[in-house]
Amino acid sequence: MSDSNTTDFTNPSTFILLGIPGLEAAHVWISIPFCAMYAIAILGNFTVLFIVKTEPSLHGPMYYFICMLAVTDLGLSTSTVPKMLSIFWFNSREIDFSACLTQMYFIHSFSAMESGIFAAMALDRYVAICHPLRHSTILTNSIVAMIGLAMVLRCGIFSLPYPFLARQWPYCRTNIIPQTLCVHMAVAKLACADTHISSYYGLFVQFSVMGLDVIFIVVSYIQILRAIFSLPTKDARIKTFGTCSSHLFVILAFYIPRLLISLLYRFGQNVALNFHVLISNVYLLMPPMLNPIIYGVRTKQIWDRLLRLFTHEGP
């Protein structure tokens, strides 16, 4: 493959990830905040997992879902950042064709899984606030485990067509991807075939997976807010709403940037490519970094256990 821009090939052995086009000279500087965000994500999510595991009082549905979210965040960040940093630091731009498709699969799987976990958390908050006396009987450990397994299977199955479709296409234009990651549509643009089915499938997944999750979350919170506003005192309303605040923060941090990036991708043709790539990368790292911080600060039980951990106080 002496000239990757012109040579015809059906299945390239490698792709070339450019990083952030036009900002190659600043890659080392750009890597500093990305590395810091990754370190915070790893430390924060492992800390959450450790605290929930070692504190028996946190062994309940809400905290199990938080642990699922932490594992998902670890998977999402670890499937993307190491290769990104290797491009920034060592100019290691080549990625094996199969490794590219594997990364594509995990990026889409973990992103969809995060959305599903937010929907499961909304269910937990709905049951806890609207049916508090039945919470422990409705969301038993086995039910929580089944919900988690369903989320994994759903996202794993829905994400399978992405690499499968990409493997079937002939690539005869170039093997250069102007990105830091092997995302589905970036690879689809390199194929010399009709890839409309990929666009349609991507939209189908957006609406049937994340779209349904958003509808479920909205309906759940409508019921939750109705229950909160029916409480007799202002203090009771504030206290009850406070139990949902962490969940609302992480939902907004996940869905709002995703919506903006989706609109930017589809309608921002005049936006510079390097800005688009940079914002997309920041979005992938923001939830894994912010989620443990938000839950650590906004969830009293986790915060108290964290303080005891660092001050070496007894249980």
Image (tube, rainbow, N blue to C red):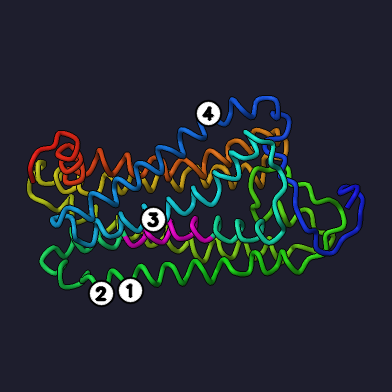
Q: Position of residue 298 (x, y in %)?
A: 24, 40
State how far apart marks 3 and 2 are (Cα): 19 Å
Cα distance, mark 1 to mark 3? 16 Å
Please indicate whether residue 283 sits to the left or right of residue 23 in the image: left
Q: Amino acid at mark 2?
A: Ser
Helix, strand or loop at label 1? It is helix
Kindly identify which numbered label has been placed on residue 88.
Answer: none
Label of residue 142 in the image: 2
Q: Which residue in the structure is indicated by mark 1?
A: 146
Few, some or many residues within 10 Å of mark 2 (<14, 14–19, 20+): few
- Judged left or right of residue 256, residue 294 is left
- Residues in magenta, as a range: 109-120
Q: Amino acid at mark 3?
A: Val
Q: Amino acid at mark 1?
A: Met
Q: Residue at x 34, y 60 (%)?
A: 219
Amino acid residing under circle 4: Ile
* Residue depth check, mark 3 versus mark 2: number of the one nearer the observer: 3
Q: Is residue 214 above or below residue 302?
A: below
Q: Secondary structure at mark 2?
A: helix
> Where residue 121 appears, x then y in whole percent?
31, 58
Residue shown at the point (88%, 47%) measured from the top left? 5
How many angstroms separate mark 4 from mark 2 (CA)?
42 Å
- Indicate the secondary structure of the residue bearing disc 3: helix
What mark, if any, has residue 32 been given in the picture? 4
- The picture places residue 274, in percent across and down from the top left corner, at 68, 34
In this view, the mark in front (1 or 3)? 3
Residue linked to disc 3: 71
Residue toward you, 234 or 90: 90
Name above or below for residue 141 compared with residue 203.
below
Q: Residues within 10 Å of mark 3 (few under 14, many from 20)?
A: some
Ranked by sequence position, the earlier of labels 3 and 2 is 3
Tell whether 236 sits left or right of 247: left
